[in-house]
């Protein structure tokens, strides 16, 4: 047993297994139905993480009323105070990184270094938002009349519904909550029903940072029982949603009927385009890490490699060499480099795609098998997979698999590569490997995506837009003006003097 292994397991054994409630008006409470459901560690089906409330519409009602009441106070709280609370919250996240990472890895399955990376990313995002609280600027405009001062001010829109998926249980909700707080909105947050545990600690830390009661509320439960009443509640004025494209479309229809705002971060089918043979081993290394980190369960994971014919053999060889270095294991094994899938159902859905790929005529070059011997029997593990001879019309090249499956698509010319990269309903992220400056700029302009990475696999930064085009959504996170537009509305003020 390694040091980290013993530390994480010891911590889990001492701290997991409690009954948790909803966080409403600054207090922990049972759901009104009193019903609960258990959640076990992804990598050990006997390790109970906790019992969580099966909430419903009545709990949502209480949470929204609490957020509405708090809105009157929070929207009138000085921006500098809101900013200070956010800085304190960031410091607390940083101080508790180890414990938060243990919780995150236990409920989501990702390896511990990725969980730590996620918390540190959240810290940066909160600090960025703390600064942004003081930049909710309006304008002073020329007046049509003399002795008249004309200006605009920014007002927070009200109660926000924040709805998150299960792949990034810390940074995704924080990316919604921190800007909402910075600009004076209040929040009702629904975590993914399978990963609410880290959020329990996040709520505690918000309270510890001095956030007034009711400003952020969390209701745990299913999409149909909690998410649906939340997006339909008449006091909710904006929905910040991250999840599948299918659900994003539904949310957008509900919001359009109610004339409220949405911020949608949805699915992806992200290409890496390889147009040169220089440094192929380095390119393969970057592709493999961007494809298989978080077991390929990232919205930005590379899932298609589009490569020129003359480079393909060499690249594929290097990709397989890199994939063979991946060690699949639980988060408490510090030598593991890829964790399990989030649950058995998801593993099965990915396995179906492995079969679909084979039936469609793609060639499975390496991996893809379920791992079930020894400790692997305790969780949903598989080896990462790579398919060759994939064409753009195959389902494995078009549909979001959201797992460790990579498709290699060979193209004859550089312009074919761009066309195939764009031949997707999605438009989230893409990478291009080429040292030709004109090609790099041509692709940066021509790729129909929200994020382009030239000569590397993937990256994100707290102050840079993170979001998609086409069916990958709209309303980029992590940037001042985009969040400012979403969380506030403009008011014109004319002053005659
Ligand atoms: P979804 O099934 O869409 O679920 C996302 C959230 O919506 C969950 O909290 C879910 O609750 C909730 N929900 C379900 N039905 C609802 C309803 N009727 N009304 C309101 N909320 C409802 O996605 P997922 O499977 O958790 O996550 C994977 C997807 O998220 C992938 O497509 C991935 O690409 C996408 N994603 C995108 C990004 C960005 S930034 N573009 C980042 C991460 C993930 P339950 O948990 O109870 O089902």
Image (cartoon, grey):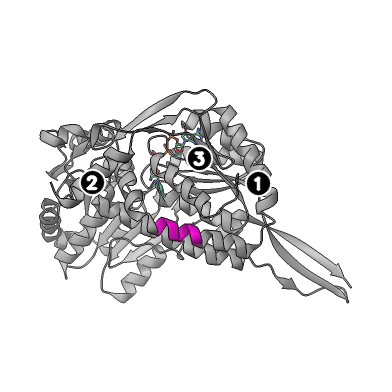
Circle 3: element type: helix
Query: Crowding near pointer 2: few (<14 within 10 Å), some, many (20+)?
Result: many
Residue 484, position in %: x, y?
59, 60
Mark 3 and mark 2: Cα distance apart in space: 34 Å
| 287 in relation to 58, above or below | below
Quickly name the residue at label 1: 70
- Residue at 60% in and 54% down: 487
**Residue 455 seen in the figure:** yes
Mark 2 and mark 1: Cα distance apart in space: 39 Å
Residues under numbered marks 2 and 1 in contact, where contact means CB atoms less than 8 Å apart:
no
Whether the residue under disc 1 has CB within 8 Å of ligand 1: no
- Residue at 54% in and 32% down: 228
Provide the residue span drawn in magenta: 88-94
What kind of secondary structure does the magenta stretch mostly adopt?
helix
Quarter holding residue 356: top left
Circle 1: element type: helix
Task: Indicate the quadrant containing the C terminus: top left, top right, bottom left or bottom right.
Answer: bottom right
């Amino acid at each position: 047993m390694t040091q980290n292994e013993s530390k994480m397991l010891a911590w889990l054994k001492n701290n997991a297994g409690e009954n948790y409630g909803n966080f409403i008006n600054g207090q922990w409470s049972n759901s009104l139905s009193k019903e609960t459901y258990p959640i076990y560690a992804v990598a050990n089906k006997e390790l109970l993480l906790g019992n969580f409330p099966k909430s419903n519409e009545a709990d949502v009602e209480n949470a929204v009323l609490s957020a509405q009441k708090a809105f009157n106070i929070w929207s009138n709280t000085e921006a500098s105070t809101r900013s200070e609370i956010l800085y304190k919250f960031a410091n607390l996240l940083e101080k508790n990184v180890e414990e938060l990472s243990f919780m995150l890895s236990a409920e989501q399955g990702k390896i511990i270094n990725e969980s730590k990376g996620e918390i540190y990313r959240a810290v940066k995002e909160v600090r960025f938002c703390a600064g942004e609280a003081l930049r909710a600027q309006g304008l002073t405009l020329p007046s049509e009349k003399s002795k008249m001062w004309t200006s605009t001010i920014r007002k927070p829109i009200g109660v926000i519904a924040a709805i998150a998926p299960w792949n990034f249980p810390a940074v995704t909700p924080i990316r919604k909550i921190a800007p909402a707080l910075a600009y004076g909105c209040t929040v009702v947050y629904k975590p993914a029903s399978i990963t609410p545990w880290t959020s329990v600690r996040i709520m505690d830390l918000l309270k510890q940072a001095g956030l007034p009661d009711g400003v952020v509320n969390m209701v745990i439960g299913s999409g149909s029982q909690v998410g649906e009443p939340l997006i339909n509640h008449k006091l909710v004025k904006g929905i910040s949603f991250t999840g599948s494209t299918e659900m994003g479309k539904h949310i957008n229809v509900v919001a359009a009927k109610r004339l409220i705002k949405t911020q949608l971060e949805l699915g992806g089918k992200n290409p890496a385009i390889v147009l040169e043979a220089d440094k192929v081993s380095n390119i393969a290394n970057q592709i493999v890490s961007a494809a298989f980190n978080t077991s390929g369960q990232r919205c930005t994971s590379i899932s298609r490699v589009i490569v020129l014919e003359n480079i393909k053999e060499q690249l594929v060889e290097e990709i397989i060499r890199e994939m063979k270095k991946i060690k699949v294991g639980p988060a408490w094994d510090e030598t593991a480099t890829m964790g399990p899938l989030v649950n058995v159902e998801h593993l099965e859905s990915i396995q179906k795609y492995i079969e679909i790929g084979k039936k469609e005529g793609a060639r499975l070059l390496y991996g893809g098998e379920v791992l079930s011997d020894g400790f692997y029997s305790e969780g949903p593990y598989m080896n990462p997979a790579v398919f060759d001879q994939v064409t753009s019309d195959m389902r494995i090249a078009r549909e979001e698999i959201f797992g460790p499956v990579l498709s290699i698509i060979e193209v004859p010319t550089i312009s074919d590569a761009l066309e195939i990269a764009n031949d997707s309903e999605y438009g989230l992220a893409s990478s291009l490997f080429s040292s030709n400056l004109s090609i790099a700029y041509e692709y940066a302009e021509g790729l129909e995506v929200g994020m382009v990475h030239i000569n590397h696999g993937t990256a994100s930064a707290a102050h840079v837009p993170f979001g998609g085009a086409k069916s990958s959504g709209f309303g980029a996170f992590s940037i001042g003006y985009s969040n400012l537009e979403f969380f506030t509305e403009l008011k014109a003020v004319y002053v005659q003097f």
